[in-house]
Image (spheres, rainbow, N blue to C red):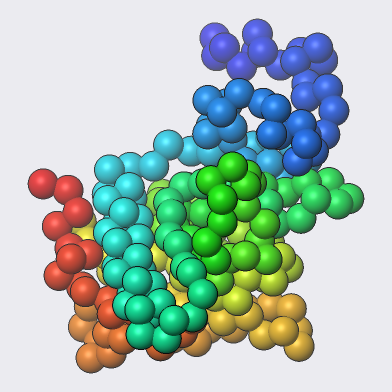
Amino acid sequence: MSAVFDWAKEENLQPAPITVAIWKELPEAFCRLVEIVNGEAVRAESPTRAHQKAARRIAELIETAAAAHVDQYRDGCLDVNTDFDVVLWEFPEATIRRPDVALFDCAPDDLRPLPASMVKLVVEVVSPGSEKTDIAEKKAEYALAGIPWYWIVWIADNQVSSIQIHVLDHAFGQYRLHAQLKPTTVETIVEMPIQIEVDWERLSALTL
């Protein structure tokens, strides 16, 4: 019999909504296993090796682009990170997501979770079972939080097979498709929010 039947008891229900203040006091090991959706802890699925490597390599491409952008334009300070907490909103119930990759204004290390207002781009790599969350739920949430750009990355045959680039339409509060890049397309330069070169060779052979 599944252990779920032993666990599914009234006393095991989450006793109260998780606020940002509560989240900051929770053990980090627990926070790494969950996301908070409207105050409720939701288990975050463990990514595959291909997923992890795709996210890391895309983060490297964006980080290189961010450094070049800041060096050329002296335009503030930009940072890139993977799998860390971003608070989309606090009220009426907190929602805290862990995007696979994010480009954001530089922030102190102790500013956790990072406010969505500081984020310029989020990237989610789609894994089997995460399609609904990435292309529907998170897409709507990131738009509602006002994050300007959202990339949805698809993997097939051990490589990144497609990158859907969405831009926030502020008039409607929704993302619209800006571009869809594939290894077979000529276009490899993404101009916004900064100029990013997509190196398809770097995004192949994800696992050996």
Task: Depth check: give the residue in front, 170 or 152.
Answer: 170
* Quarter containing the N terminus: top right
Query: Quick check: can you spot residue 195?
Result: no
Residue at (70, 27) in percent of width and height: 25
Name the residue rendered at 35%, 55% in the picture.
Answer: 55
Instruction: Give the residue displayed 17% in from the left and 48% down from the top.
Output: 207
Q: Position of residue 65 (x, y in %)?
A: 33, 75
Quadrant of res 69? bottom left
56 with respect to 194 (left or right): left
Place of residue 24 in the rendered image (x, y in percent of width and height, measured from the top left): 69, 34
Q: Residue at x 76, y 55 (%)?
A: 89
Q: Is residue 1 left or right of residue 140?
A: left
- x then y, percent, for residue 161: 28, 69
> In this picture, is 118 found above or below 36?
below
Q: Nearer the viewer, residue 176 or 105?
A: 105
* In the image, farthest residue toward the left: 208
> Residue 186, how many percent across, how many down?
23, 91
Quadrant in the picture for residue 42: top right
193 vs 139, left or right, is left
Disc tally is 0
> Is residue 106 visible to the viewer in this orientation of the structure?
yes
